[in-house]
Image (tube, helix red, strand yellow):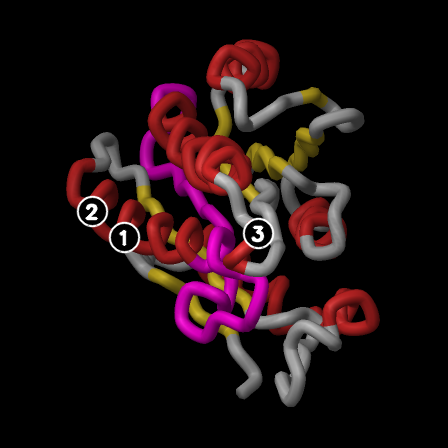
Amino acid sequence: MKILIVGGHGTIGKPVAEHFRKEHEVLVAGRSAGDVVVDIANSASIKNMFERTGPIDALICIAGEAKWAPFDSLSEEDYYIGLRSKLMGQVNLVRIGRQHLNANGSITLSTGILADDPVIKTTSAAMVNGGIHSFVKAAALEMHNGIRLNVVSLGMVEDAYAKYKDYFPGHNPVPMHKAVNAYVRSVMGKGHGEVIRVYEN
């Protein structure tokens, strides 16, 4: 398979890319480095990326940002960071990318536990994650050519524990092999329109 991983150099993306690279051709896309460069907040950049990669069998997105800040301090523009990047960035990857997928290909998006179990300072991120869950369920009903669409929703992963533990008091970190397997399930399985939740509560 030819697999494109957007965000394949990140905390989660790197081990996911390493796993799939054992048996498949993997292309990594990043905002500043990679086999191809892409800004998912810019639809023209997304189109250019797919023109460079050519047809693919699977698309995985483990990218997108949202503002973390107290609710009282969030401005309208702060919300647009997450809306443009993590929400519409992933929506546009599906909207544009499905035209570049081979028959029976798959698309996997990424969210996180905040959609179901938010913590303080995550109003914007939680809103975006929940929106993506609803988008995947609805858009899956209208995929063509055998293309499957899923989203992986992870809890705080082990490799990010030191950085984010103060935000998630009492949360148990998700082992990295479980995080990787969630993406394997989406790409290699037959699920469609699924929110693949991996939480260690």
Quadrant of the rendering where the C terminus is positioned: bottom right
The residue singled out by tag 2 in the image is 138
Q: In the figure, residue 90 lies in which quadrant?
A: top left
Estimate the spatial distance between the alpha carbons at disc 2 and disc 1, rounded to whole Å. Answer: 6 Å
Q: Is residue 5 magenta?
A: no
Q: Given the current orientation, which residue lies at the most extreme right position?
A: 162
Q: In the drawing, does residue 3 fall left or right of residue 163?
A: left
Answer with mark 1 or mark 3, whichever residue precedes in sequence. Answer: 3
Q: In the drawing, does residue 184 fall left or right of residue 83?
A: right
Q: In the drawing, does residue 112 fall left or right of residue 16?
A: left
The amino acid sitting under disc 2 is Ala
Q: Tell me the residue at 33%/57% (across/down).
A: 190
- Circle 1 crowding by C-alpha within 10 Å: few under 14, some 14–19, many from 20: few
Q: Position of residue 2 (x, y in %)?
A: 57, 33
Q: Position of residue 35 (x, y in %)?
A: 74, 24
Q: Position of residue 32 (x, y in %)?
A: 77, 25
The amino acid sitting under disc 3 is Ser
Q: In the figure, residue 91 lies in which quadrant?
A: top left
Question: Considering depth in this image, is 19 or 96 the residue closer to the camera?
Answer: 96
The amino acid sitting under disc 1 is Ser
Q: In the figure, residue 100 lies in which quadrant?
A: top left
Q: Secondary structure at mark 1?
A: helix
Which stretch did the figure color magenta? 99-126
Answer with mark 2 or mark 3, whichever residue precedes in sequence. Answer: 3
The residue singled out by tag 1 in the image is 134
Quadrant of the rendering where the N terminus is positioned: top right
